[in-house]
Image (tube, rainbow, N blue to C red):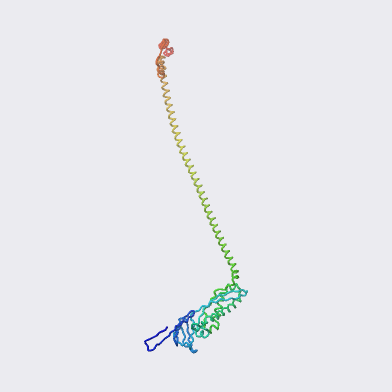
């Protein structure tokens, strides 16, 4: 920035340059002036200002002027740092495994760290500080050394089964007790062993039995499901068959009941017909008996009448009887249009009419 003030008797030029020094997790702002510079720290960076070898300023969030000619600035992060690491080791049965771990640490003595490691603030155009790479190298080598010693005493199966927990405890204790880290001002907060894995072909070979077992379990589950489905289908078929048998049994009972009802109805109808026939026969018998009695009575009356008539006719003369016979016969004869009476017929009839029958005389006697 360039500022010119023309009102003054002479021209004054003030030049101010601003330089921002950045690191991975912190950001410090340095404003440069012609003879001095101004430093403005960050909330997570511990700055150490050395002037002529003596500590002039130190702390978090510092702001001060300094002379670049005789000052050295170092900024040490005070927040928790994560360091992922990956290395290889050989087991007791000569199998190569890869170990993936993560170390959490922090700087508890920034002044000691600034004197042991390179965390200097560099202006643009110069090589960046290498303090983080140094810490990564130190912690990574320590982790790899202790892990190799531990894994060399175990087999591949033991390392895969229990190596993660055992290695986590060993690395945590070893790093926290390391004298170099303590003297440097580095505190180990925790170690996490994420994985211990063998080579790809060995891992596939180890996974094969498990995969086969899982496939067998899957097949067994499929077979069991099919068996359960077949059993359920059989149960359903049995239930349907039982239902059909029950329906047939009920239909048989229904047919039997209907037959029994029909037989009972026929028997009742036959009994009613028998009763009706008996009643009709009895009525006919009574009617026949009455008719026979009536005929008998009529016959007896007719016989009595004939007897009375004969009794009456018994005392009559022959001519009277003949006249009565002719009278009765005349009622049943057909119509006669012309009747010719010969003298012989008339004389015979008259002779017979006036002749006294012997029987009558004998009866009179």
Q: Report the side of 350 relative to 198 (left or right).
A: left
Q: Quadrant of the C terminus?
A: top left
Check the image and report above or below for 195 versus 3: above
Residue 109 image position (x, y, % from top left):
50, 84
Establish if 284 lies above or below 69: above
Q: Toward which corner of the image does residue 29 lie, by quadrant?
A: bottom left
Query: Going by the image, does 88 lie left or right of 324?
Result: right
The location of residue 233, given as percent across then percent down, is 53, 56
At which x and y percent is residue 360? Answer: 42, 13
Outermost residue toward the right in this view: 93
| Res 298 → quadrant | top left
In this rendering, the answer to whether 251 lies above or below 20 is above
Closer to us: 86 or 93: 86
Q: The N terminus appears in which quarter of the rendering?
A: bottom left
Quick one: 245 or 13, which is closer to the camera? Answer: 13
341 or 61: which is nearer to us? 61
Where residue 228 sits in the image (x, y, percent)? 54, 59
Horizontal relation, residue 6 to residue 225: left or right: left
Q: Is residue 359 above or below residue 260?
A: above
Q: Quadrant of residue 85?
A: bottom right
In the image, 240 versus 213, the foreground residue is 213
Question: How many discs mark residues in the rendered view?
Answer: 0
Q: Residue furthest left?
A: 7
């Amino acid at each position: 920035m360039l500022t010119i003030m023309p009102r003054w008797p002479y021209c004054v030029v003030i030049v101010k340059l601003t330089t921002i020094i950045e690191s991975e997790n912190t950001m410090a702002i340095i404003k440069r002036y012609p003879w001095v510079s101004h430093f403005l720290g960050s909330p997570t960076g511990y700055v150490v200002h050395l002037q002529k070898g003596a500590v002039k300023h130190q702390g978090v969030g510092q702001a001060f002027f300094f002379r670049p000619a005789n000052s050295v600035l170092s900024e040490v992060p005070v927040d928790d740092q994560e360091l992922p690491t990956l290395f290889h080791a050989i087991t007791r049965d000569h199998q190569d495994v890869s170990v993936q771990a993560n170390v959490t640490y922090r700087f508890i003595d920034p002044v000691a760290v600034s004197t042991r490691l390179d965390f200097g603030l560099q202006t643009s155009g110069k090589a960046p500080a290498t303090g983080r790479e140094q810490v990564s190298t130190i912690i990574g080598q320590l982790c790899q050394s202790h892990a190799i010693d531990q894994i060399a005493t175990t087999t591949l199966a033991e390392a895969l089964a229990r190596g993660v927990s055992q290695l986590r405890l060993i690395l945590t204790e070893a790093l926290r007790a390391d004298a170099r880290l303590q003297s440097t001002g580095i505190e180990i907060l925790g170690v996490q062993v994420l994985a211990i894995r063998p080579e790809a072909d060995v891992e596939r070979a180890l996974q094969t039995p498990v995969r086969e077992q899982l496939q067998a379990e899957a097949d067994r589950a499929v077979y069991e499901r099919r068996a359960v489905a077949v059993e359920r289908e059989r149960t359903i078929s049995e239930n349907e068959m039982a239902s059909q048998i029950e329906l047939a049994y009920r239909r048989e009972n229904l047919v039997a009941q209907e037959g029994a009802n029909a037989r009972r109805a026929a028997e009742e109808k036959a009994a009613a017909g028998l009763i009706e026939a008996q009643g009709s026969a009895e009525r006919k018998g009574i009617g026949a008996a009455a008719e026979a009695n009536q005929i008998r009575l009529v016959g007896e009356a007719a016989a009595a009448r004939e007897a009375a008539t004969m009794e009456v006719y018994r005392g009559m003369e022959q001519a009277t009887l003949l006249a009565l016979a002719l009278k009765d016969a005349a009622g049943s004869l057909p119509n006669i249009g012309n009747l010719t009476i010969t003298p012989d017929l008339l004389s015979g009839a008259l002779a017979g009419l006036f002749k006294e029958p012997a029987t009558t005389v004998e009866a009179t006697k």
